[in-house]
Amino acid sequence: MALRVETLALASLSCWLAAGELRYEVRHDHFPGSGRGTLSISVDGVRYREHGKPAHSRDWSWDDVQQLLVAERTLRLLTYEDSRWRLGRDRSHRYELAGAGSFEAVWTLLKDRLDQRLVAALARPEGELWWSMPAKRLRRLGGDHGELLVTEAGVVFRSRSAEASRTWRWKDLDSVSRTGPFQLIFATYERALADYGGLKSFAFQLKRPLGEEDFRRLWLRVNRRHGLQTYLTTMERSTEP
C-alpha cells in the first residue's frame, strides 16, 4: 500500500517563500513580556526579527541549535545559550503562528537536510506502508490515543492531541523494544530535558497484538544503523523461505 504524499501550498496568511527561505509572522513569548516578529528559516539556519524591539532579534546557524521541534502551530528552538532565569539551563525559544497556516513546510524543507536535531511533532507518513496499529502513547499522567504507522521511510504516531504526534525517520530512532505483543518502546534522539544528553523514550500500549514477523522486521530496520549490517543481512537470508 502506498501512502499519498501531499504537495504543500507554501502560500498562506502567515508564511511565504522568499530568497530561498521560509518566512512566518509569529508571536514570541519571552520574559519579561512578549512580542511579534518575522521568523525566517533556511538550510543555513534560523533568523528572528522582532518588530519594534531590535534587541530581541536573533540569528542562529545550525551549529548554534541543539534541537528544532516543529509542530503544526508552534516551533521550539533549543540553543546552547544559558538561561539566567532558569538557573543556567539551556535556553529555549518558542514561536507561535500569528495567522492562519502551519509550520509543516519547515519539516518538508529540512527533513532531508538536517540530522537528528530536527524533531517532527507532526504525522507525515511517506512511502510504502508496512503495518499500522491503534495505540496509546503512555505518559506519567494519562496518555495520547492515536495510530502507529510503520512505513518504508520510518515510524509515525498520528494523534489528535496537540504536539503529541511524531514522525521519526529511521535515523531518529536509537532502539526499539517490547515486553510483550501489546507494547512497544522507542528510544529516540529527541532531547530528554530531565536528563542531560539522555534519549527520550516513547512507550506505546498497542490495542491489538503485534505479530512476531512485524516486530522482527521493525527491529531489524532500526538496528541497521548500529554496525550490524553484515550480521543482520545474514540473519535475514537465513530465515528466507
Image: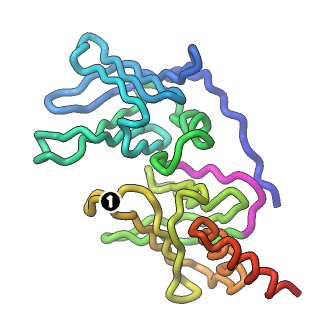
**Above or below — where is 150 with respect to 87?**
below
Can the viewer see residue 121? Answer: no
Q: Residue 1, how many percent across, how many down?
A: 82, 61
Horizontal arrangement in the rendering, residue 48 relative to residue 166 (left or right): left
- Reply above or below: 18 against 67: above
Residue matched to label 1: 197
Q: Residue at x 61, y 21 (%)?
A: 11
Label 1: few (<14), some or many (≥20) within 10 Å?
few
Which scheme is used to colour this image of the protein? rainbow
Q: Is residue 126 magenta?
A: yes
Q: Label 1 sits on what residue type?
A: Gly
Instruction: Give percent across and percent down for residue 216.
Output: 67, 81
Question: What residue is rendered at 24% in x and 21% in y?
Answer: 56
Q: Is 169 one of the magenta-colored residues? A: no
The image position of residue 124, as x and y in percent, is: 62, 49
Picture coordinates of residue 117, whole percent (x, y): 45, 47
Q: Quadrant of residue 210?
A: bottom right
**In terms of secondary structure, where does tag 1 sit?**
loop
Q: Residue at x 76, y 81 (%)?
A: 234
Provide the residue span drawn in magenta. Answer: 122-130
Q: With respect to residue 46, does 217 lie above or below?
A: below
Residue sitting at x 43%, y 35%: 62
The C terminus sits in image quarter: bottom right
User: Which image quadrant for residue 91?
Assistant: top left
Q: Residue furthest top?
A: 52
Front in this rendered view, residue 17 or 138: 17
Principal SS element in the magenta part? loop
Residue 188 visible, this orientation: yes
